[in-house]
Amino acid sequence: MSGIILPGADGQLFQRDRAWHPAADTPGYKSTTFRAPRHSLLALGPTRSEMSGPTFGHETFGPLDNDLIRNYSQDGTDAIGQRMVVYGQVLDENARPVPDTLVEYWQANAGGRYRHKKEGYLAALDPNFGGFGRSLTDENGFYSFRTVKPGAYPWPNGGNDWRPAHIHFSVFGHAFAQRLITQMYFEGDPMIWQCPIVATIPDKAAIDQLTARLDRHNTAPMDALTYRFDIVLRGRRSTMFENKLEGN
Amino acid sequence: MLHPTPTLKETPSQTAGPYVHIGMTPNFCEITGVCDVDLGLNMLANDTAGERITLTGRVIDGAGSPVGDAVIEIWQAQADGTFAGPRTGEQGHGFTGWGRQPTQPDGTYRFETVKPGPVEGPDGRKQAPHVSLWIVARGINIGLQTRLYFADEAEANATDFVLNKIMDPRRRETLIARKEEGGRYVMDIVLQGEGETVFFDI
């Protein structure tokens, strides 16, 4: 090959720091008990199969895809709850923006209830809130969406466990091995520190990385509070050019 | 220096939770009208080249119970061994290479796709035809990565560098889908215990 390698087609990924992520088996979060593999993971340097990844076209996206206040509205009115904008930048570990990547998010409504038939919490469903949206990052890696702040809710883990308010995120990146699912928490929420799922993360600094910041300067007056949540995907080594051995 | 030192830490993973189907297959769990179709359901177009196949099986936990709340994504080469999409510079001919399916309440999954061609490995030799898989669900703190190989590719499988990293031949079998009538390949994904699938740290 002539030296130029297309982005996404090559450039070895940095090794994943698994001590920064939760372990597979975390007894405080009981659902892991029968779902955590017991064998060690097989170490595998990524091949072209894991270094490449799917591409998503703009045409797949509708104008309300990133507006959870309106995108499930049954009668044209807004979802109930504290109005909020969430935005952030998707970067890699080299602090390079990740453009044109799919970010999906889902959450409970303002009362803390999910629109799901297995949901057991007593809080009311909001007929105008579905709890799902998606964005494609722009050329600088930014995404944003409009929603209502999700409520905290109880869940069957210990006798009386509650999840802090949170939003689930799924992010693609440009390589299949960058694929990530995580959750965003809210700055200042005291319930973060009692949650068994948050506690699966061993390092307080890593938990802090999942905590969105209130962005007072970008709030919409008389409309919505704004939170910023940046997401970091695995980095790649620079593509090496034959005529420039120090890398690019 | 060939590569810079990382300056940021990867965002820590969290479980996809019990309601991952809301976020990844909203129409499947009756959140309709937000998007027309769930992404990744259909990987094929009429003019997609290659042998049509079905990949199926069950996801099973360490208690032997079906995992009915998982999402599986696959990523694979086309029949000619190239990956579809503008980033790789290869024409997809209507084939996405990427699929996403929820597991059903009985833990089964199913993808309609084409049989992939062999892909170049790091040493320049071809890898055996394979499909990359990623599995998330409640109780999985970080998505599980594995591969599916094809039982009717015994010769290629015998020299595949990934399969050959697995010392125990019985464990190697966990990545090989058996062939059934009608182009069906069947591979169960066992999260834990007897017959546990080999998962990768990539």
Image (spheres, grey):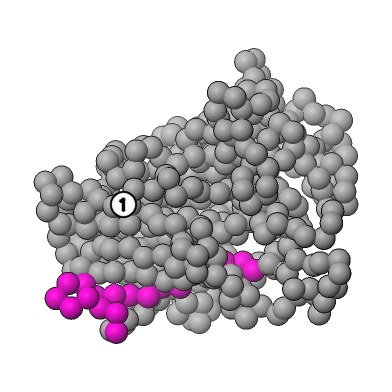
Measured from the top left, where is residue A244 in percent x and y?
A: 83, 73
Identify which residue is drawn at 57% across, 38% down: B96
Measured from the top left, where is residue B115 in percent x and y?
A: 68, 29
The chain ID associated with circle 1 is A
Write the start and end of the magenta stretch as one range: A217-235
Q: Out of B15 and A131, give the one closest to the viewer.
A: A131
Identify which residue is drawn at 55% across, 23% down: B46
Q: Is residue A195 above or below residue A53?
A: below
Measured from the top left, where is residue A107 in percent x and y?
A: 31, 58
Q: Out of B19 and A194, give the one closest to the viewer.
A: B19
Q: Is residue A139 above or below residue A57?
A: below
Please state which amino acid type lies under the numbered disc 1. Answer: Pro
Q: Quadrant of residue A28?
A: bottom left
Residue A60 seen anywhere in this rendered image of the structure: yes
Residue A180 seen anywhere in this rendered image of the structure: no
Identify which residue is drawn at 74% across, 37% down: B81
Q: Secondary structure at mark 1?
A: loop
- Kindly identify which residue carries mark 1: A63
Confirm whether the magenta stretch covers residue A115.
no
Left or right of B56, for residue A224: left
Few, some or many C-alpha atoms within 10 Å of disc 1 (few <14, some 14-19, many ≥20)?
few
